[in-house]
Image: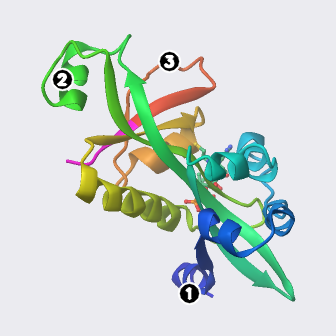
């Protein structure tokens, strides 16, 4: 099966909709099928009920799932979580602050969108990362069309392969943070 065929075979669903249609216990069971050995934080956010589910119920975040039917079981093979963020600009150069803000090089806090989580299960052998990121950006763009907002932020794990995934064409996220000692590095994606 090609990457495209595999991706098209998945069901793309909003956690919000699932919570309206099914008992929470059933959703918790579904979310617990997601495994990510490379990034335990990604797994933990989804499978811990007081994280993804509670954040969804309180409208703090919005999570979107990719579901695969395996035999008779449905499993979560990938997901992303998006939300709003107030970016604190301390430590950033004046030119970057002006670029992000659009007007003021001294702005201390700038509103933006955040890709809080994004990734696929360890057992997914298809390279669908690009499709997931495209969907996350497209979903944010729906909000951008209505209320504006200048850029997307994410905290990438500080691993070269992952940074390159975000940085390389066609994604073109830009590093905001060059500190190689940190566990995560901030990157942004201009929407304008
Ligand atoms: C990042 C990701 C979405 C990219 O998906 P993809 O385009 O389908 O590509 P791959 O899964 O093949 O990943 C590309 C490379 O990055 C490596 N990689 C990805 N995430 C990694 C991680 N967290 N730690 C170490 N290496 C990682 C892969 O092993 C692969 O390396 P290879 O080319 O040498 O085999 C996907 O790898 C993923 O979900 N990773 C785990 C979760 C994660 O870390 N998400 C990013 C949070 S900021």
Disc 2 to disc 3, C-alpha distance: 21 Å
Residue placed most toward the observer, 152 or 178:
152
Disc 1 to disc 3, C-alpha distance: 39 Å
For label 2, count other residues whose C-alpha is less than 10 Å away and answer few (under 14), some (14-19) or many (20+): some
Q: Could you tell me which residue is drawn at 69 percent across and 49 percent down?
A: 52
Residue 181 part of the magenta segment: no
For label 3, being within 8 Å of ligand 1 is answered no
Residue denoted by label 2: 98
- Snapshot quadrant of residue 40: top right
Chain-order first, disc 1 or disc 3: 1
Residue 5, labelled with which disc? Answer: 1
Q: Secondary structure at mark 2?
A: helix
For label 1, being within 8 Å of ligand 1 is answered no
- Please give left or right for residue 16 compared with residue 178 in the image: right
- Magenta segment: 188-192
Q: Residue 123, image x and y in percent?
A: 78, 65
Is 81 located above or below residue 101 in the figure?
below
Residue 179, labelled with which disc? Answer: 3
């Amino acid at each position: 099966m090609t990457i495209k065929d595999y991706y098209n075979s998945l069901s793309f669903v909003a956690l919000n909709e699932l919570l309206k249609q099914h008992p929470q216990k059933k959703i918790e069971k579904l979310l617990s099928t997601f495994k990510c050995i490379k990034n335990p934080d990604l797994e933990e956010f989804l499978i811990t009920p007081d994280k993804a589910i509670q954040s969804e119920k309180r409208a703090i975040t919005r999570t979107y799932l990719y579901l695969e039917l395996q035999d008779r079981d449905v499993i979560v093979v990938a997901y992303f979580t998006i939300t709003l963020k107030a970016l604190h600009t301390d430590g950033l150069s004046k030119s970057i602050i002006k670029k992000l803000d659009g007007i003021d090089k001294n702005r201390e806090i700038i509103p933006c969108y955040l890709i809080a989580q994004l990734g696929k299960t360890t057992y997914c052998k298809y390279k669908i990362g690009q499709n997931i990121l495209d969907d996350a950006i497209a979903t944010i763009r729906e909000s951008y069309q209505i209320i504006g907002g200048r850029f997307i932020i994410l905290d990438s794990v500080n691993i070269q392969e992952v940074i390159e995934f975000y940085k390389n064409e066609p994604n073109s996220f830009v590093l905001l943070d060059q500190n190689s000692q940190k566990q995560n590095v901030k990157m942004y994606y201009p929407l304008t």
